[in-house]
Image (cartoon, helix red, strand yellow):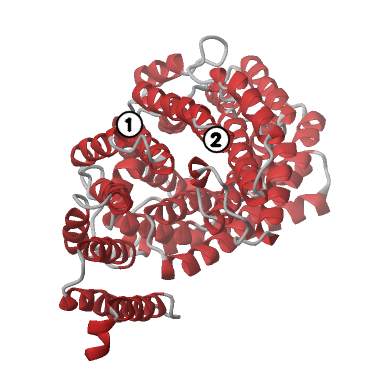
C-alpha cells in the first residue's frame, strides 16, 4: 500500500495489464477482466484515469457481454470528460444505441460530438462516417451522401487523400447503379496514385474493389465481375502478409480505418460466395461459406462487433438458397432457424433482414409445395422492403407461385406488368431482367402459347449466356426441351435437354435434374433408345427418392412451423410436427 501511495501510476498499469491479459486469454476471461478494471475505482484515481476506466469498462462490456445497460452506464459517465475519452465514448455509445434500436438517441449524440471534434481530424472523420451510416439505416440516403461529402471535403482540406478516398468509396455505396461510374473512376485513380503506408494502400484497394464487385453483382453481371473479383482475392492475400506494426501515418486524419484486416478477409469470402451463388457454382459457394463461418467463429470469441453478426446472417442467407437448389431443404430450414435466432439477439439485425427472412421462407415453401404459405411469406417480405432489387426478386418468385396455382390470373397479370422485361424494367439488374423473361416464358408454356414461350426463353438464354448465369441457362434449356417435346420435335428437344442435364449436374440443381431425367426417359422411349430410356428412368427414380426423403425430413422438423409466421419478431420456440403437412404427390 505504501508503494502505491508513492507511485500511483504503478497500480493502475498493473491492473490494466491484468485486465488485458484476461481479455485476450483463450478463451477470454471477461469476468476477471471487468473485476480488474472495477478495482481501479477503489484507489480514488485522478479524473482522467477515472474517465478512461469508465470508457474501457464500457467497451469491454459492450463488445464481450450482453450487459448492455451496464456498458451504457459506464460510457455515459465517460462522455462529459476529456477530449481523448469523450469522442471514443460517444462513438461506442452511439453503436450501442443503434444495437438497441435507439437511433433517435444516437443521432444527437453524434451531431454534438461532430461539432466539437473539428480540431481532432481522426475523430471528426470517424464520427461523420458513423452518422452517415445511421442515415443509411433509416433509408435517408440524401443526408448520408451529404455527410460523406462533408467528410471527403474535410479530409481534402486537412491533406488526407486516404480518408478522402474512404469517404468517396462510402459515397459509392449510397449511389444508384447508374450514378457510380464517375465516382468509381475518381476513386480508382486516387487509390492507384496514393503513396503511403502499405497496409493503408492495400486496405483502400480492398474497399474499392469490394464496392466494385458488389456493384457488378447488384447489376447481375456475373461474368463481367470476374477480373475485379480476382484482383480483390489477390489483394486480400497481399494484405494478410503485411504486418500491422508499419510506421503510423503522420497525418492524424489518416488514422481513420474502415475495417480491421481480419474482418476484410471474411468480407472477401462473403462477396465470393455472393458471386458463386449468382453464377451457379454452388459447391464453390459452400466451400467459401464454410471458410468464412469458421473465421467468424474465431473472431466472435474475442469481438462481438455487430458487423460480424451481419456477415454471418448474409452468408447464411446465400447458403440457404444454395441448399434449396441442391435438394437439402431440411438443412436449409435449420439454417433459416439459425438466422431467426441471430435476429432475436439484435433488434437492428432483424429490422435490416426481416424481408430477407420471409423471402427465404417463401422459397422454402415453394420447395415443399406449400404455395399458400409461399404467397403469404412473399407478401410479408414485400411489405417490409424498400430495396428495389430485393423487391424485384420477390415479385418474380411470387409470380412463379401464381403460375403454379393456375387460378390467380388478375394478381399474376398485375405483377407481370410491374416486372415487364421488354420495357421499363424497374431495376438495372441483368440477372433479374433475364429471370423476368424466363417467368414470361413459363407462363406462355402453361398457357400453350409455345411460339411466344420460345421467344421469351431464347431471350433468357441470350442474356444468361452473356453473363454465365448457369442456373437460368439450365432452367431455360429444359423448358425449351419440354416445349419441343410437346410439339413433337424430339430431335430438337434432345438437343436442349442433354446440355440442361449436364449443366444441372454441374451446379448441381436437383429440380432441373429431376425434370430433365423425366424428359430424357420419355424422349428416348419416343426415339426407340430402350437402354438410354431405362438409364434415364433409373436416374429419375433416384432423384425422386432423394427429394422425397428430404421433403419428409424437412416437413417433420419443428422448425417447419416457421412457414406460418408472417408478422412480428420471429418465434423463439417450435412445436414438433406430427408429420409432413404438405402434399408430396405434385412434388414428384
| Dot placed on the residue nearer the N-terminal end, 1 or 2 | 1
SS for dot 1: helix
Foreground residue, 557 or 185? 185
Q: Which residue lies under the disc numbered 2? A: 160
Q: Quadrant of residue 527?
A: top right
Quarter of the picture containing the N terminus is bottom left
Foreground residue, 547 or 199? 199
Q: Where residue 238 sits in the image (x, y, percent)?
A: 71, 54
Residues packed near mark 2 inside 10 Å, few (<14), some (14 to 19) or many (20 plus): many
| In-image side of 566 versus 541 (left or right) | left
Q: Where residue 299 sits in the image (x, y, percent)?
A: 48, 65
Q: Which residue lies under the disc numbered 1? A: 135
| In-image side of 14 versus 187 (left or right) | left
Residue at horizontal 16%, vertical 78%? 42
Residue at horizontal 42%, vertical 37%? 125
Foreground residue, 73 or 120? 120
SS for dot 2: loop
Q: Quadrant of residue 22?
A: bottom left
Is 340 located above or below residue 393 in the figure?
below
Amino acid at each position: 500500500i505504501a508503494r502505491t501511495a508513492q507511485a500511483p501510476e504503478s497500480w493502475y498499469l498493473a491492473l490494466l495489464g491484468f485486465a488485458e491479459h484476461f481479455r485476450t486469454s483463450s478463451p477470454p476471461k471477461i469476468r476477471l477482466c471487468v473485476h480488474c478494471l472495477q478495482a481501479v475505482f477503489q484507489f480514488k484515481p485522478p479524473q482522467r484515469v477515472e474517465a478512461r476506466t469508465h470508457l474501457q469498462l464500457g467497451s469491454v462490456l459492450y463488445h464481450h457481454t450482453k450487459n448492455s445497460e451496464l456498458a451504457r452506464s459506464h460510457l455515459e459517465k465517460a462522455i462529459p470528460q476529456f477530449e481523448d475519452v469523450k469522442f471514443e465514448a460517444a462513438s461506442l455509445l452511439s453503436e450501442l444505441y443503434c444495437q438497441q434500436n435507439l437511433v433517435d438517441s444516437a443521432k444527437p449524440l453524434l451531431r454534438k460530438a461532430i461539432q466539437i471534434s473539428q480540431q481532432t481530424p481522426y475523430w471528426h472523420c470517424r464520427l461523420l462516417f458513423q452518422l452517415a451510416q445511421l442515415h443509411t439505416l433509416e433509408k435517408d440516403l440524401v443526408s448520408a451522401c451529404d455527410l460523406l461529402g462533408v467528410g471527403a471535403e474535410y479530409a481534402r482540406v486537412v491533406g488526407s487523400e486516404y480518408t478522402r478516398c474512404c469517404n468517396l468509396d462510402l459515397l459509392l455505396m449510397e449511389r444508384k447503379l447508374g450514378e457510380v461510374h464517375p465516382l468509381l473512376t475518381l476513386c480508382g485513380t486516387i487509390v492507384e496514385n496514393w503513396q503511403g503506408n502499405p497496409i493503408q494502400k492495400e486496405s483502400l484497394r480492398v474497399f474499392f474493389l469490394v464496392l466494385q464487385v458488389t456493384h457488378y453483382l447488384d447489376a447481375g453481371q456475373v461474368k463481367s465481375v470476374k477480373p475485379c473479383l480476382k484482383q480483390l482475392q489477390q489483394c486480400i492475400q497481399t494484405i494478410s502478409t503485411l504486418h500491422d506494426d508499419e510506421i503510423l501515418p503522420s497525418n492524424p486524419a489518416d488514422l481513420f480505418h474502415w475495417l480491421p484486416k481480419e474482418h476484410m478477409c471474411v468480407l472477401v469470402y462473403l462477396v465470393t460466395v455472393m458471386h458463386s451463388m449468382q453464377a451457379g457454382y454452388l459447391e464453390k459457394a459452400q466451400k467459401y461459406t464454410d471458410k468464412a463461418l469458421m473465421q467468424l467463429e474465431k473472431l466472435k470469441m474475442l469481438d462481438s462487433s455487430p458487423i460480424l453478426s451481419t456477415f454471418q446472417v448474409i452468408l447464411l442467407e446465400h447458403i440457404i438458397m444454395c441448399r434449396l437448389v441442391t435438394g437439402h431443404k431440411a438443412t436449409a430450414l435449420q439454417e433459416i432457424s439459425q438466422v431467426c435466432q441471430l435476429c432475436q439477439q439484435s433488434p437492428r439485425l432483424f429490422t435490416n433482414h426481416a424481408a430477407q427472412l420471409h423471402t427465404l421462407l417463401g422459397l422454402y415453401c415453394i420447395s415443399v409445395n406449400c404455395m399458400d404459405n409461399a404467397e403469404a411469406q412473399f407478401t410479408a417480405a414485400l411489405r417490409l422492403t424498400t430495396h428495389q432489387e430485393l423487391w424485384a426478386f420477390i415479385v418474380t418468385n411470387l409470380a412463379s407461385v401464381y403460375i403454379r396455382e393456375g387460378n390467380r390470373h388478375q394478381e399474376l397479370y398485375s405483377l407481370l406488368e410491374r416486372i415487364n422485361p421488354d420495357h421499363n424494367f424497374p431495376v438495372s439488374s441483368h440477372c433479374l431482367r433475364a429471370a423476368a423473361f424466363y417467368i414470361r416464358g413459363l407462363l406462355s408454356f402453361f398457357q400453350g402459347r409455345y411460339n411466344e414461350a420460345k421467344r421469351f426463353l431464347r431471350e433468357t438464354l441470350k442474356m444468361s449466356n452473356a453473363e454465365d448465369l448457369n442456373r437460368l441457362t439450365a432452367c431455360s434449356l429444359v423448358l425449351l426441351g419440354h416445349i419441343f417435346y410437346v410439339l413433337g420435335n424430339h430431335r430438337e428437344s434432345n438437343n436442349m435437354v442433354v446440355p440442361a442435364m449436364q449443366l444441372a449436374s454441374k451446379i448441381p440443381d436437383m429440380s432441373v435434374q429431376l425434370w430433365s431425367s423425366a424428359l430424357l426417359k420419355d424422349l428416348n422411349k419416343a426415339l426407340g433408345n430402350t437402354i438410354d430410356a431405362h438409364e434415364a428412368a433409373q436416374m429419375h427414380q433416384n432423384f425422386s427418392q432423394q427429394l422425397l426423403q428430404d421433403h419428409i425430413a424437412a416437413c417433420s422438423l419443428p422448425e417447419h412451423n416457421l412457414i406460418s409466421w408472417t408478422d412480428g419478431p420471429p418465434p423463439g420456440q417450435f412445436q414438433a410436427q406430427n408429420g409432413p403437412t404438405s402434399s408430396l404427390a405434385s412434388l414428384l
